[in-house]
Image: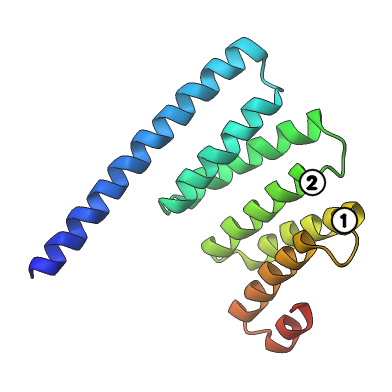
């Protein structure tokens, strides 16, 4: 019983910390957009951090919203196949995977993979990481032979 109280207390503190962290990132982003405009890479970077905070706090809907806004900014500001765009697609794929939306997850991860192969070649760490995420996804969907093919 005492252990359960400690766990509950810890989780409560984590939730408060995530809320405070999200509030600070949101405040930062509002200032960045006001000073630098809507389409500035710093705003996209802050949205990425905010998406991670929400994702870690298990608020996938809010995380996805932030990641998709980040992606739109990056697409407008950066070249089409920039690695930051692949990184955002990886995050979106992970969020969709957590939400159980395996089709959208695979689509996002596949986009990230294509960008990473274009930038880094077939045998890079970034390609391997994306392939690993795809294999995890396929394993979750029961596509074991396809998952092995991506490892």
Left or right for 60, reference 116: left
The residue that appears at 51% across and 38% down in the rendered structure is 50
108 or 90, which lies in front? 90
- Looking at the figure, which quarter contains the C terminus? bottom right
How crowded is the residue under tag 1: few (<14 C-alpha within 10 Å), some, or many (20+)? some
Indicate the quadrant where residue 112 lies.
bottom right
- Figure check: 2 above or below 27: below
Identify the coloring. Answer: rainbow
Image height check: is 96 above or below 63?
below
Find the distance from the CA under tag 1 to the CA under tag 2: 9 Å
- Disc 1 element: helix
Q: Can you identify the residue that label 1 sits on?
A: 120
Looking at the rendered image, the disc whose residue lies closer to the viewer, 1 or 2, is 1
**As drawn, which residue projects farthest toward the left?**
1
Residue 132 place in picture, x, y as percent: 69, 71
Residue 126, quarter of picture = bottom right
Circles 1 and 2: CB distance less than 8 Å? Answer: yes
Residue 130 position in % (x across, y down)? 73, 64
Q: Please, is residue 127 above or below residue 89 in the view? A: below
Please tell me whether mark 2 sits on a helix, a strand or a loop. helix
In the picture, the disc for residue 83 is: 2
Left or right of 70 on screen, residue 107: right
């Amino acid at each position: 019983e005492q252990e359960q109280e400690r766990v509950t207390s810890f989780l409560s503190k984590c939730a408060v910390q995530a809320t405070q962290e999200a509030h600070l990132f949101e405040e930062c982003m509002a200032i960045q957009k006001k000073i630098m405009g809507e389409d500035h890479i710093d705003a996209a970077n802050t949205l990425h951090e905010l998406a991670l905070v929400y994702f870690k706090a298990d608020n996938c809907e809010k995380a996805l919203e932030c990641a998709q806004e980040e992606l739109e900014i990056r697409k407008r500001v950066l070249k089409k196949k920039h690695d930051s765009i692949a990184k955002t697609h990886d995050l979106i794929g992970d969020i969709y995977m957590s939400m159980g939306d395996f089709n959208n997850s695979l689509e996002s991860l596949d986009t990230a993979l294509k960008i990473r192969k274009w930038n880094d070649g077939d045998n890079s760490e970034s390609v391997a990481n994306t392939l690993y995420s795809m294999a995890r996804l396929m394993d979750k969907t029961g596509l074991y032979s396809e998952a092995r093919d991506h490892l």
